[in-house]
Amino acid sequence: MAMPRRGEHTSGFPTERRVEPGVDRIGVRQVTVPASGTSGLRSATVAVSFNPAAFRCARLAGELADEWVELAQAARLREGAARAYLTAIKALLTYVDAEVPGAGSASLARDDPDLRQAVTGWVRVLPSQHRAGSRTPGWNAGRVRALIARRAEHPDRPVAGHWSGWIDGALGVRRGSSSELDEFSRADKKTLIRVASAARRATEARIRAGRELAATGTDPARGGWLAAENLLWAIWTGAHPCEQIPARLPSAPKLPEVLHRLAPDGAWHSTRSLLRFLVAQLFLTAMDLHAYRILLMAATGRAPEEITGLTEDDLEFGPSGVTITFSKARANVRARQAFSSDLAPAGQLHPPGLRLDAAEIIRALLELNRPLADRVGISPVPLFLRASLPGTEVVAGLLTRSKGLDFTHWLRLQGITVSGPADIRRLRKSTKVEKAIAFGGRISDIADDHSEQTFRSHYAHGTTLRVIAGDVITTAQRRWLDTALAGPTVLDEQATRSLNDPGSASALGLQPADIEALRTGQLNMGVTDCSDPFTSPFGRPGQLCPVAPLRCLECRNAFVLPSNLPQLLLFAEHLDQLALRLTPTHFHALWGQSRATLLEVLRSRTDTELRDARRQIAEDGLVLQLPLASRVEFDA
């Protein structure tokens, strides 16, 4: 058998075979992320899980779920962001189950079925599932694209089809837009702060009275279940679970009169309503927290989520106030800011004005919320903790936007009507507008708690700032027009002869002595005459005009008489020579207005007047009457 020649060894290395990938993992995917919202009250972390088997396209669900788990761990996503990715994944999987034939075999590693076409169809119908202009379709499509891009970059996770165009190119759906909120008017803001201050005082008085009454009570098993102080004692101490209290009470119609008098409408229709009322006498409720949020937003100028997310660990009290560490999860930013207390001097009965004291408000909130936090084992104590009775036990929660507990409902309960939408974020914009006015529009000072771009795109669109900007533009335009139009007064021969008429002289603001001085040349400044050289707009009052005759053609005090025509022609020649020496931009900046006025004056003269003036220059040997400094400038 002949030996193979060089290069004929074809079986020395095995041919690489592509193995059809299967499902990487089976079962429920779970990731542990930092908790947020109400979940954060119970634990610092929360486990978020997803079961791919809940969908027909389980293989595709498992692939996206694997990328989701790794992304959540690598990017350190919080609970809200992790759940948002899950929402986008479930939306795509639901579409694939319903619209793609053979969804059970769908996989990013397979060409059949064509998932590229399926994702394109899903992106196309996303906007129809949300309100017009919503940003949710763009967010969901972007999250799915991020997961597919991660898988395509992994060397051991093949992705079939041509995804690079969609991954690197257009998303296929608009990002959406949001309507900018206007700030509260000054009257609405004052009303909100005034009503919130009154509501806060009423809340603290109510809870103080409720806790004092509870302190006078005793165990209902000994003192009786029909006394309000005993019921409050049982709730406050937790000696009897709340679910046992209704069983110890008679039906609502049979409750004693002393308990019925506590009802807002004079009678209880259920024992559960009585129990909720008693809980509200001891702890803050959702409706109580709105007043504190308004006051703290007005005192600090911060966004609502920065205020409601505060805990006692974010506070550092000092002898003169409090230093607060604000967290803005959307921007992943933490910032510290100090607020001083405004203590009235001893013996001063009437302070000069109301100033919201952030330190005092926060101390009051901590004092009110600490008992509830200790009761349910929450640490650190959140500032905006509320008690509720959804079932048979007192539950601690955070401020919510649920219907009936939101800011709109609080306004309705307080009898407040505001212009525009009832959105608490408008209070933040009101503060930014006030800061813009105080700092004179300097964005670097206004945008001290966010970027300058955020201010331009988000906060600089309120009505007040638009009006201020309009006033600034109008003032600048008026100043420019006054400078351009308030020039010299040009008189021809007939107008000069009519100066003897008292009506004409008064219309020009001249006195008889001024007219005589103009006729005799006493007010001649070289190029033009002047009504009063000591009130020049270019100098101090009482000072002889420092710029004559160079700026006479830009001055409102100047009078151009027919006798000034020879000097005007000589001045025009000098400006023509100067225009040849300077760049057009430089010349226009220095002499553009004077030249425009001069040309307009010369165009108003007849050809005969111009010929006579040039003949006078030639016969009398006239030269331009300029100061020595001006000649140095021209000759330089």
Image (cartoon, grey):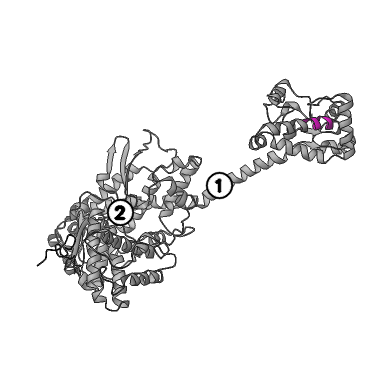
- In the rendered structure, the answer to whether residue 302 lies left or right of residue 3 reads right
180 in relation to 115, above or below: above
- For badge 2, the amino acid type reads Arg
Residue at 24% from the left image edge and 75% from the top image edge: 105
Specify whether 495 is left or right of 228. right
Cα–Cα gap, marks 2 and 1: 47 Å
Q: Quadrant of the C terminus?
A: top right
Main secondary-structure element of the magenta-colored stretch: helix
Percent of width and height locating residue 317 = 28, 39
Q: Is residue 79 visible?
A: yes
Residue 492 lies within the magenta run: no
**Could you say which is closer to the camera, residue 284 or residue 265?**
284
- Toward which corner of the image does residue 176 lie, by quadrant? bottom left
**Disc sitting over residue 206 in the figure:** 2
Residue position marked by numbered label 1 in the rendering: 469
Left or right, residue 148 beside residue 468: left
At label 1, counting other C-alpha atoms closer than 10 Å, the crowd grade (few under 14, some 14-19, many 20 or more) is: some
Name the N-terminal-most of marks 2 and 1: 2
Q: Which residues are magenta?
A: 564-571
| In this picture, residue 243 sits left or right of residue 142 | left
Q: Secondary structure at mark 2?
A: helix
- In percent of width and height, residue 609 lies at 88, 36
Q: Residue furthest front?
A: 2
- Seen from the viewer's position, the closer of residues 445 and 87 is 87
Q: Nearer the viewer, mark 2 or mark 1?
A: 1
Quarter of the image for residue 623 reads: top right
Query: Which residue is outermost to the bottom?
Result: 101
SS type, badge 1? helix
Q: Nearer the viewer, residue 134 or 89?
A: 89
Q: Residue furthest top?
A: 628
